[in-house]
Amino acid sequence: MDITRRTFLAGAVAGVGMVATRAAGAEASKGTPNVTFGVLSDVHLNRPGDEDTFLKALAYFRDNGADGVMIAGDIADTGRIEQIERAAKCFWSTFPDGKAPDGRHVEQLWVYGNHDVGGWAWQKGKDEAYLKSTAIRYGNNRAEVWERIFHEPYSPIWAKTVKGYTFVGAHWGNEKNLDAFLQANADRLNLKNGKPFFYAQHPHPANTVQGPWAWGNDRGVATRALEKYPNAVSFSGHSHYSITDERCIWQGKFTSVGTGSLKYIFSQYWRDNGENHNGVVKQMRMLPEHTGRQGMLVKVYDDRIVFVRREFVHGESLGPDWVVPLDGSCPMAFEPRSARVIAPAFPSGAKVEVSRANGKDRSGKATDQITVRFPAACPSATSRVHDYEVTALAYHEDVDYPVATKRVLSESYFLPPTREAKSGHIVFAVSELKGAKEVRSAVRPLECFGHKGPEIYSELYKVS
């Protein structure tokens, strides 16, 4: 996706994995939430007719009691006014006059992302009148478009109240002004009374969700602002990281939540079926990212916040609810959560098969390739498979030694648990094996925090 992509809550996320969160999710269903809101990001409406998934998501929120719908940026794909108009039409058709069928008001909690207000090639060479009528970014159009379409004043950073809870949103590029805004308005917005408040921006606050390597983070401007408010809950997108990944919720001095994407999932770097990155030739095609379209429903109670993760192609759960208690207990940062993880493992008797054939790498270059195939590893009590590590071990005299190690994402890591892949594979170019004569393959499953299950091995096979 290159450059255009990618004491509150001192409480713990209730369980890292499936056993703990399953129990917490059952508990979370009890009682009536004080406020409920849907959360999406990276909708990326482009051409007329591509609204179906967005409409499905809005209908799910409507039918499940949402009092608001948050979009953490990139409503439009190429910054055209028409794309924003269609997004608004979807909202108004689902919530006529801003209301659900039972009469409750449903608030729009949307912010612009970089795709909404960025510059795009289609705008080059166009005259002023054309740009003013078609491009959100042109002149002061971002404000004019917003006010005309959404019937409310435009503000670079806005604040709204929904059922007694404060929501704040910063449009793309304005997160740098968040600290000043919060300080100036903390008393008016009751931000220091311990009650959770909710914040939306497009890029991830740095060093929160996914850790310091998160693509396209905000370099810490929102992190520095929000860490003064332990009752803050931040929502952000931009990276398109799958919310099946437990690293998409983070707790430290505040809480940060990654929102996935309603358009496509960003498959990570350094996996052979993941995203392209400079200087690395990959042998495998990228995963079909468009098949993962995600969002969440957030339910706020007196004593906890529940995050219901949802997939909108198949209309299924993406896993047990994330539950954050508001009880003043110790926060659950990545390290202690990771310490409780049990890695997935292969089923008994699992075998690794190896074959060799002429093929093509991702660039289309003809390549002598070795394919390593294996059955899918089984989820553990706490985690499902995120990816696999495959090592080619050359046999020399009486020693196996590694000559190449690669990672490959589980083909279903971003899909609902009901759609787990039954097998996996990885492809090595023979040239990657560095002249080894005989090789065996070792395969290990990993969960998202990087814990590795036991390896299984292929038989020894000749390379040269």
Image: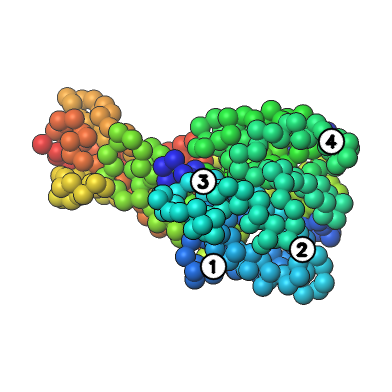
Query: Which numbered marker is on residue 71?
Result: none
Residues at marks 4 and 1, CA–CA distance in whole angstroms: 38 Å
Q: Is residue 269 left or right of residue 360?
A: right
Asked if residue 336 can be seen in this view, the reply is no
Q: Residues within 10 Å of mark 3 (few under 14, many from 20)?
A: some
Residue with the mark numbered 3: 118
Q: Amino acid at mark 4?
A: Ala
Disc with the residue nearer the chain's start (3 vs 1): 1
Residues at marks 2 and 1, CA–CA distance in whole angstroms: 20 Å
Q: Residue at x 62, y 35 (%)?
A: 205
Identify the image quadrant of residue 235: top right
Q: Amino acid at mark 3?
A: Gly
Residue at the limit of the structure toward the left, as seen here? 464
Residue with the mark numbered 4: 186
Q: Residues within 10 Å of mark 1 (few under 14, many from 20)?
A: some
Residue with the mark numbered 2: 106
> In the image, residue 194 lies at what x, y percent?
86, 38
Q: What is the secondary structure assignment of the residue under circle 4?
A: loop
Q: Is residue 172 left or right of residue 280?
A: right
Identify the image quadrant of residue 439: top left
